[in-house]
């Protein structure tokens, strides 16, 4: 019992590899979000360039304030050069680490410190722009980097209160709104507030998108791990079933040759039916063994699209107690393909679900559409429960109430997703040209099964 539990959960090295894969995935999503945030910083830097140019021009030509124009333009040129280089680099490199965001903010802080040093230091009302950079660091950076940036910004502001080139601007606060200092503070406040609302909103949207993508990837990894575990259990069960099925096959063969049975047509007919069902069980077991972790080529069959579907429909009709089965092959131009037992079982699984819901009639339509194989399976049953449709493809998502139920569509969705396809389901509306019941549509890209793509397997 202990051994079975351990094999179901997987050995420790497999769990450690899964954890490592999850950490690598999380890092990749974080780096991708960092790239988007870096592009936001580059846009913000261009706004800073335009704002500095406008402020310098207004101070000189409108307010007649004497500024060290050449050094300030040199600092502005350095900012432009850095932003051009950043755009060229991060346009090609799609992953940005937190350290690189921290270094970019340090450069922005150094540029701001240089401009403030040349224009009054801490007495310049635009010194409050440090607050914008601190808030950006708190949003973009990890706590260690963010606190480090806070200390650097505080030290810079403290240094500017002692070392700076004086700004010929009187602090005539008694004039109220007419004071140039008060006007500068108001402009700085509006600039800070506007840029924070605009860019923080976009940055938070990037972070939320990254979190949603990471959650989706983790959910998908958990589902794929669940499939692997079920594959291991199914493979073990198939190995165990092989011996008793072989024994039953030998016994039925012996019974058919015994005189007591040979003289009874009814018993011979029942033995033949038992052998047919036993052959089907052995085929299912063989398919599980070939599909559970084995190479695709071992269980693959070279055929054509129309032939495979025709044979599958004929075999399924003959081995199931279905009263009415409507099969429509609208493939048109045939295509050489490679199919294996996994794909065959996936389609049969959908048909079996339809048969269980609608024993009187099941329909299947096959067609080619926009480079995809389109399979539409319909029935005339009660349809899907809304809760099932909302969680389509999730494990154990079933209203049957049986242990282990709800795995059929889960496996179908995962097999289709592995091939790059999709699975959708809906309830047909009775009285609107449809006969009611449910409809499941499978779309598989033909490039994933075409012989030209898989002939080397």
Image (cartoon, rainbow, N blue to C red):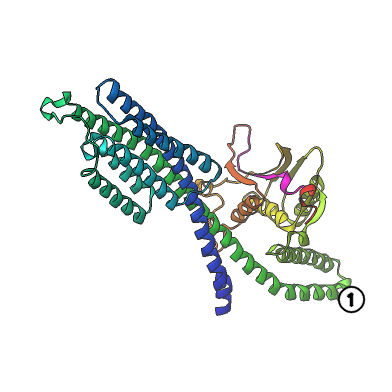
Determine whether, in the image, residue 427 is placed left or right of residue 376: left
* Residue 371 at x, y percent in the picture: 72, 39
Question: Where 452 sits versus 63, above or below?
Answer: below
Position of residue 291 relative to residue 243, above or below, is above
The quadrant the N terminus occupies is bottom right
For the point 28% across and 42% down, the residue is: 131
Where's residue 449, x and y in %? Answer: 74, 49
Looking at the image, can residue 321 be seen? no
In front of the other: 85 or 387: 85
Residue denoted by label 1? 259
Q: Image quadrant of residue 143? A: bottom left
Q: Nearer the viewer, residue 431 or 31?
A: 31
Is residue 222 shown left or right of residue 343? left
Q: Is residue 443 left or right of residue 245?
A: left
440 magenta-colored = yes
* Residue 34 covered by magenta stretch: no
Residue beneath the point at 70% across and 62% down: 291
**Quadrant showing the C terminus:** bottom right
Task: Place residue 373 in its image quadrant.
Answer: top right
Please name the residue shown 26% across and 27% down the image: 66
Residue 32, can we see it?
A: yes
- Residue 442 coordinates in the image, percent (x, y): 66, 45
Which residue sits furthest left?
Answer: 174
| Percent coordinates x, y for residue 321 in the rendering | 72, 55
Q: Determine the residue positioned at 86% across, 72% down.
A: 256
Q: Find the residue positioned furthest to the top.
A: 62
Secondary structure under tag 1 reads helix
Which of 82/188 is in front?
82
Residue 105 in which image quadrant: top left
Q: Which residues are magenta?
A: 434-450
């Amino acid at each position: 019992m202990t051994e079975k539990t351990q094999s179901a959960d997987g050995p420790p090295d497999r769990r450690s590899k899964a954890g490592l894969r999850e950490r690598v995935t999380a890092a990749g999503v974080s780096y991708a979000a960092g790239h988007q945030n870096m592009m936001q910083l580059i846009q913000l830097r261009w706004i800073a360039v335009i704002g500095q140019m406008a402020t310098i021009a207004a101070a000189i030509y409108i307010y007649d304030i004497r500024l060290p124009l050449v050094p300030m333009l040199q600092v502005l040129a350095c900012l432009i050069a850095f932003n051009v280089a950043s755009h060229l680099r991060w346009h090609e490199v799609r992953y940005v680490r937190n350290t690189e965001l921290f270094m970019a903010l340090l450069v922005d802080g150094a540029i701001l410190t240089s401009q403030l040093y040349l224009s009054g230091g801490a007495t310049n009302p635009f010194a409050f722009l440090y607050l914008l950079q601190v808030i950006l660091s708190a949003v973009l950076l990890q706590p260690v980097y963010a606190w480090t940036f806070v200390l650097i910004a505080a030290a810079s502001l403290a240094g500017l209160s002692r070392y700076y080139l004086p700004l010929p601007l009187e602090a005539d606060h008694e004039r109220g709104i007419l004071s140039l200092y008060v006007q500068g503070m108001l402009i700085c406040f509006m600039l800070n507030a506007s840029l924070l609302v605009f860019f923080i909103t976009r940055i938070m949207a990037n972070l939320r998108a990254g979190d949603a993508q990471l959650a989706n990837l983790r959910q998908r990894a958990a589902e794929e791990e669940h499939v692997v575990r079920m594959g291991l259990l199914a493979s073990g069960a198939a190995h165990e079933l092989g011996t008793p099925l072989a024994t039953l096959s030998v016994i039925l063969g012996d019974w058919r040759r015994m005189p007591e049975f040979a003289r009874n047509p009814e018993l011979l007919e029942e033995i033949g039916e038992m052998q047919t069902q036993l052959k089907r069980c052995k085929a299912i077991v063989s398919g599980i063994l070939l599909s559970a972790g084995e190479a695709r080529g071992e269980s693959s069959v070279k055929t054509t699209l129309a032939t495979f579907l025709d044979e599958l429909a004929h075999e399924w009709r003959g081995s199931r107690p279905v009263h009415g089965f409507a099969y429509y092959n609208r493939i048109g131009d045939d295509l050489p393909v490679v199919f294996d037992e996994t794909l065959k079982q996936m389609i049969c699984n959908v048909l079996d679900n339809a048969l269980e819901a609608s024993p009187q009639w099941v329909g299947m339509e096959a067609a080619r559409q926009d480079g995809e194989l389109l399979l539409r399976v319909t029935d005339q049953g009660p349809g899907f429960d809304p809760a099932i449709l909302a969680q389509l493809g999730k494990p154990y998502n079933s209203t049957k109430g049986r242990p282990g139920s709800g795995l059929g569509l889960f496996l179908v969705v995962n097999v289709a997703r592995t091939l790059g396809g999709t699975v959708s389901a809906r309830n047909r509306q009775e009285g609107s040209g449809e006969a009611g019941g449910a409809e499941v549509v499978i779309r598989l890209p033909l490039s994933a099964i075409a012989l030209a793509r898989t002939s080397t397997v």
